[in-house]
Amino acid sequence: MKVTLKVWRQKNKSTPGEFKAYQTPELNGNMSFLEMLDVVNEGLANKGEEPIAFDHDCREGICGTCSLVIDGKPHGPHQGIATCQTYMRSFEDGDEIYVEPFRAAPFEIIKDLVCDRKSFDRIQQAGGFITVRTGAAPDANSIPVPKDNSDLAMDAAQCIGCGACVAACKNASAMLFVAAKVSHLGLLPQGQPERFKRVKAMVDQMDKEGFGSCSVTGSCEAVCPKSITLDFIAMMNRDYAVALLKGDPKPIAGGGA
């Protein structure tokens, strides 16, 4: 199979970008989307042209590094998978495929398909560290955790911080990401001492970074590669309301807020 790529090319954040067309060589339908880009880049390099810059790392749907909008949808046509798990068999021979970076004001484009998502790191840093001494792994595992809370915490902890939720939201909201990061600690006994300070610090940092408010359309949930649900946003909002009522302005241990 062969496809035509319309790829967003942009030298840097201060330079205007544009879509540029590339015809792929013959492809194996079982190669991943990123492997296809590798093949295209090899051809460009052999011709002395600048390869397409794109983010990638584990290529196993774990790290959250891959960040492509494929035909208008973050991570591509399927649900519950990342870009690196999208395979060329998902497309038809002769298809024209548009590829662009995640677009949001807090995600400045560095080059081509690569955007700066360090704002997510700063939000997590604002959450600080837990102060409960859990000891070694066997000691931590001996702390009783209700089964329902444990399951929910594990669901939230699946967030890989890719930013697809932001790219899909018309307001560029990071609420689903922040809710997942807040909830996986807030649901566990070890996370209780800083629970309400943590949620306020992380939400305040999210606002400081310039992310928008929740649009309540569910677009974030629809494109999340780990299928994290809007329920976590509701949980975070409840904790945030409690944090405001408590009115404790002190930063938490290790926090950046």
Image (tube, grey):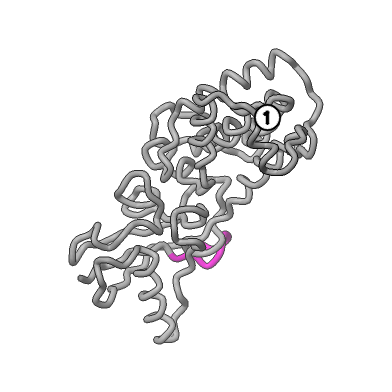
Quadrant in the picture for the N terminus: bottom left
Q: How many numbered tags mark residues here?
A: 1
**14 inside magenta stretch:** yes
**Up/down of 218 relative to 86, above or below:** above
Which residue is nearer to you in this view: 182 or 213?
Answer: 182
Q: Give the residue at x 19% y 66%.
A: 94
Residue 95, position as x, y percentages in the image: 21, 62
Residue 240, quarter of picture: top right
Q: Amino acid type of disc 1?
A: Gly
Residue hosting label 1: 191
Q: Is residue 79 visible?
A: yes
**Up/down of 75 relative to 247, above or below:** below
Residue 189, quarter of picture: top right
Q: Is residue 55 visible?
A: no
Q: Give the residue at x 36% y 75%.
A: 40
Q: Residues within 10 Å of mark 1 (few under 14, many from 20)?
A: some
Magenta residue span: 9-16
Q: Give the residue at x 55% y 49%.
A: 107
Q: Give the residue at x 58% y 54%.
A: 116
Residue 229, position as x, y percentages in the image: 43, 31
Residue 241, position as x, y percentages in the image: 62, 17
